[in-house]
Amino acid sequence: MGVGIGAVFSRRFAQRSGYSNMSNATFQEIGAVLRANQSFAVLSHVRPDGDALGSQLGLALSLSKLGKKVMVRNEDGLLEKYGFLPGGAFLQTPLGEPQDFDVAVALDTATQNRLGTATELVRSARIWINIDHHPSNPGYGDLVYIDSTAPATGQILFELITSQGLPMDQAIAENLFVAISTDTGSFQYPNTTARTFEIGAELVRCGVDVGRVNQLLYESYPKRRAELLRELLGTMRFEGHGKVASFSLSLKTASRLQARPEDNEGLIDHLRAIQGVIVAVFFEELPEGKVRVSMRSKSDAADVCAICQKFGGGGHKLAAGARVRGTLAEVEEKVLKEICHVVDCNS
Ligand code: 5GP
Ligand code: MN
């Protein structure tokens, strides 16, 4: 991926705890590359969430305001529920032919293969930048900035944009606000720090209308989503004296409800919210003989990223996922058994 131009950058050896093997570029190095180049591909992962889309559009709008040529792509485009994001048109144009870029930027994407077909549009890029907050990110690319203490990639972009004096306005702020709000569960999860609230305040000062954005984000769900939740709760089961809660979605049910993949984003929170539950799991049957497993933890002692990595996935300590080959019943059994190894289900 890319040519070894990254070698010309002196890489700071990050001193943060937990990063002894990871060398991060500095914001200054990344800022210099953003300013010095002209054409950019801004990419993110398949099945994009609010952090992926908000980060992509926030950075794209900033680069665009700087006079750069920007292409923004992910495999699924702009999901309908994020249709209100400023700059969404960037993601609505047809896929088109592969092009050459000066710089390709991967945002919020733990592994290269999670970029999916979006990479096919990049015939070549002289420099690949990888900005992310997933601890499992191996640091692919030429210029890497991974901060697993950041609750959202959008928070890292805020620091990058403001520290480097890159353009910021209401539209950019709104995208970064959505990125941070969605990945922190509306500033609720333990990854939310004092700095996150400070950045939230800064974004409001830049013009984010909190009431309006939150209504669009959290109070405009399609009826389908509530119908899906009703079905999911019907399959709810508990393991380990209520420490593990799960529910599942079969292809048949998804098709009957005409559910879209994005409809289930966040529904797992209904399991996490139950008193006594330490690990919440959502199993979603996929067409290609696989099951998407989505996991949440309420305890540092139950590292769901480590569990998901055993099944070829990854993510964060308290929120992770994997795609596992097998039927719904097979995957449920295997995964729940593994969780019960970590969370003592016998007591
Ligand atoms: P979600 O459960 O919301 O789909 O994902 C939670 C977290 O786990 C996200 O940060 C996401 O990047 C990560 N994740 C979800 N599915 C996968 C997967 O199949 N592979 C990897 N490496 N990470 C995943
Ligand atoms: Mn994220």
Image: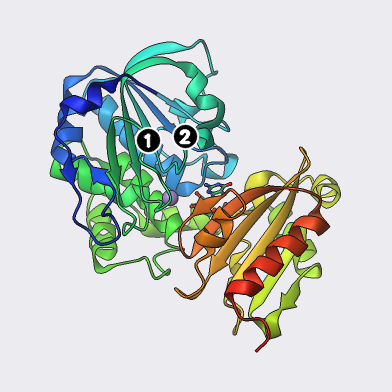
Q: Is residue 132 left or right of residue 278?
A: left
Vertical arrangement, residue 235 with respect to residue 140, above or below:
below
Mark 2 is surrounded, within 10 Å at the Cα level, by few (under 14), some (14 to 19) or many (20 or more) other residues, namely some
In the image, 343 versus 275, the foreground residue is 343
Vertical arrangement, residue 329 with respect to residue 104, above or below:
below
Q: Position of residue 155 (x, y in %)?
A: 30, 52
**Label 1: which secondary element:** loop
**On-image quarter of the C terminus:** bottom right
Mark 1 CB lies closer than 8 A to ligand 1: no
On the question of residue 227 being in view, the answer is no
Mark 1 is surrounded, within 10 Å at the Cα level, by few (under 14), some (14 to 19) or many (20 or more) other residues, namely some
**Nearer-N-terminus badge (1/2):** 2
Dot 2 corresponds to which residue? 112
In the image, 190 versus 297, the foreground residue is 297
Q: Position of residue 54 (x, y in %)?
A: 41, 43
Q: Is residue 203 left or right of residue 220?
A: left
The amino acid marked with disc number 1 is: Tyr
Residue at point 81%, 69% (across, down): 234
Q: Residue furthest bottom?
A: 347
